Structure formats: C-alpha cells, structure tokens
Amino acid sequence: MVRLHRRRRLARRAGLSLVLICGLLAQVRASDWPAFRGTDGQGRSDEVGLPLVWSESRNVAWKSAVSGRGWSSPVVAGGRVWLTTAVESRGGASLRLQAYDEQRGIRLLDREVFRLPDAELLNQKNSLASPTPIVDGNRVYVHFGLEGTAAVSLAGEVLWTAQYACDTQHGSGGSPVLYRDLLIFSCDGFTDAYVVALETQSGRQRWKTARRRPVSQAYTTPLVIRVGERDQVVSAGAYRTVAYDPTTGAEIWRVGYGAGFSNVPRPVFGHGLVFLATGFQEPAMMAVRADGAGDVTATHVAWTVSRGAPLTPSPILAGDQLYYVSDTGVATCVDAATGRVRWQQRLGGNYSASPVYADGRLYFQSEEGMTTVVAPGPVFRRLAENELAGMTLASMAVSGGAFFLRTDTHLYRIAEGR
C-alpha cells in the first residue's frame, strides 16, 4: 500500500534556484558511503590514510549523542551522516531519520517518519530501526520493515510512504538496495515471503515476486551484481538463495540449503561466485557460480565450509581470499576459489556488525565495542585492537578519510591525528 503526500505547487524562482543548488551539492561523492556496506554493498572502500588505532581519547574527531535506540548503520553522503532511530513516545515509538554534519558532528535533522502506538522488541540484538537508509541524490530512502518504507527529502519532507506486511519473529533487519529507478527489498515471514521493487519517484510497486514454498523468516539485504551482460539481484532467504531479474522480478537461478533459515548475512560477489551464509540449524558458507539458470543446487555449488560460519555478520572478499567472523568471535580466511581454509583465529567477543576492508586492512567490530584490525592474506596477523565505550552492533561506514561508528548511545567520527 502506497500513500503519496501532497506536493507544493510551483516554487518561486528564488526557491527553485535554491532547490537546484541543493541538488547539486547532494550528488554522491566518490568517497561517500551512501548505503549498507558502502557503494558496492560489499564492505570495501578505496579510502587511504585511515587510522590504525583509536580509543575514547585518541583519534576521535567528534562524538555525538544519538537519541533513542536503533542498529541501522550510519551512511555518509553530501557532507552528512545519516541514520535511523526509534524513540520511545507515550508507550509507543517514533521512528525517525537523523542527519549529522560530517565534519562537526552537529545534528542537522531529526524527522519523524512513522509513529507506532505501541512497540515491543522481541530480540535484544534487534531494534525498531535496524535497516540502514540509502542516500541517492536529493533523497533518502528509509525502511523500517513491516512498519513502513519512505522517501524523504534532504530537508526532511516525507515524499511518499509504503507498507508491506511480514510476520517475522524478531522484527525487521534487512535493508533495501537501489537499482536504477527501483528500491528493492526482501520480506521473509513465517507465512508470507516475497521480494518487492518500488519505483523511487512515487513508491508505487513495479513488481512483487513470491518466494517458493516452504518459507520461513529471514532478515537479509539483497545484492545487485552483474554477470556477463546481465544484471541480477541476489536475495538470500530461508532454505534457498535466489537471483532475480531486477527489472521484472523473474527468477534467474536458485540454490537450496536444506534447513537453513533466519538468515541475516548479506551475500558478496567476486571471481564469478556468490558467497552466502545459509542461516541457522546447520550454518555454512557456500560459494555458488552465478552463471546458472533454474535450480543450480546440484550443478553450480563450488564449495561449502561449515566450520566457523556466521549467523549474523556478512562475509568480505579481499583479493583472492574470503574472510568472515562467527557470532562468537572466530575469524576465518578461506581461498575464495576453492574454500580451502587458510587460517582460523579467535578474536574475542561477540559479533553482529559486518567487517570492512579499507586502506589495505580488515576491520572486525565486536558487540562489546572492540575493533580488531587484521592484515589480509593467507597468514593471520593481528595489527591492532581498538576499544570504544558502549555496544556496537551496527556496521561502520568509511568516508573522507574517517570511520563512522555507531554505539548504543553515540555516533563517532574516527580520523587520524585527532
């Protein structure tokens, strides 16, 4: 269901000029991190000069309090840092979009997008504001799962809203992805599961594709990839992962994994392979060749590794190695082509955030506020351990020579020499 909001009539000439200027300023810079896991959705950044070490008293450019509770990851675009949060309000919750000045940490926008008359959190590792927003030009797209999806202007005007039901046990977790003029997200519930694409300008539904039966809950974010001359949107769900045509929603290929459900990690792609986590019960990391059609379970699975597979953090690909960390803190490096385990190492702590590869280093962020920095390669080498106060379940953003980390109470900008 889509509800369009009233638009203002033609602006005065001066006002129109201001809008055009703001639109130009809002264009995404090369160094921006506009969506979950960055521009390519896989947690990799070309930034250099990033800090190796930090603490509450070292290399913190600013630290700003964040109201409410939310585990959406920060995104950075056009000189602003964006996130969502849920603020308690008269027994319910106000679901809000907030923006902070990238250089100073000053809050510039705090806009209510949806209001819930009552609110109940069913899982301590989730929140009412866990999906990560997307900034594109002069719009921010926010997604609160079954509570609603919306497009918001940079000034905070809600342009359209849409709502899609999804009966999950633990609320909402997966973020949307942009493809051309479409906003695509997955809805995986116990009785109803589907992937849907909304037109970015209006919020109207372009397509909606039901999952194959049986279905169950999942909390994943789709990934857009290009295979040969064709684009695909890969969406992991309960019992199977499916690649769809992003323009029509038609199924291209699918791979099954038995009892896997309640999936969270976002797939990554490289070397012609999609790397995905199969979910609970018997978790495994799986590599699937992405050039198949139909059911490819028996023909296109390159390898499967079960030991140390994550339930929550997404994997990361750097060069010829794939890296991932289990929820209980065991990091693994495997050869991306063969799945051969190169090393496994206990980092300590518990993990929900997805790792980042930047400035030639891997950053693994624990729930307890510790970020372990590791050198990529087939031999394990720990470079640093950096601790901040508070819980850190949200994944970090990388932009403008800095890291942006969200704890349960604050947003940080971590930069060298601060």
Image (tube, helix red, strand yellow):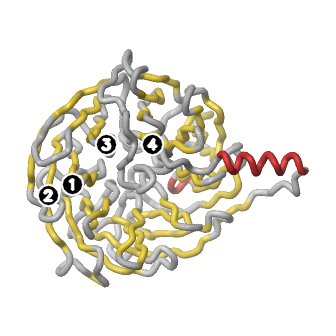
What is the residue that sits farthest to the top in this orientation?
57
Report the mark closest to the observer, 1 or 4. 1
Label at residue 322: 1
Q: Which residue is mark 3?
A: 352
First in sequence: mark 1 vs mark 4: 4
At 48% from the left and 51% from the top, the residue drawn is 35
Report the mark closest to the observer, 3 or 2. 2
First in sequence: mark 3 vs mark 2: 2
Image quarter in which the C terminus is found: top left
Quote the CA–CA distance across marks 4 and 3.
12 Å
Report the mark closest to the observer, 1 or 3. 1
Along the line of sight, which residue is nearer the eye, 378 or 352? 378
Quote the CA–CA distance across marks 1 and 4.
22 Å
Verify CB contact (< 8 Å) between mark 2 and mark 1.
yes
At 40% from the left and 79% from the top, the residue drawn is 229
Whether residue 171 is visible here, answered yes or no, is: no
Using residue 201 as the reference point, say whether residue 330 is left or right of it: left
What is the residue that sits farthest to the bottom in this orientation?
294
What is the residue that sits farthest to the right in this orientation?
12
Above or below — where is 59 with respect to 116?
above
Whether residue 318 is visible here, answered yes or no, is: yes
Quote the CA–CA distance across marks 4 and 2.
29 Å
Q: Which residue is mark 4?
A: 73
- Identity, as a three-letter code, of the amino acid under mark 1: Leu
Label at residue 335: 2
First in sequence: mark 4 vs mark 3: 4
Residue 178, image x and y in percent?
Answer: 52, 62
- Identity, as a three-letter code, of the amino acid under mark 3: Ser
Residue 298, image x and y in percent?
Answer: 17, 80
Neighbourhood count class around disc 4 (C-alpha, 10 Å): few under 14, some 14–19, many 20 upward? many
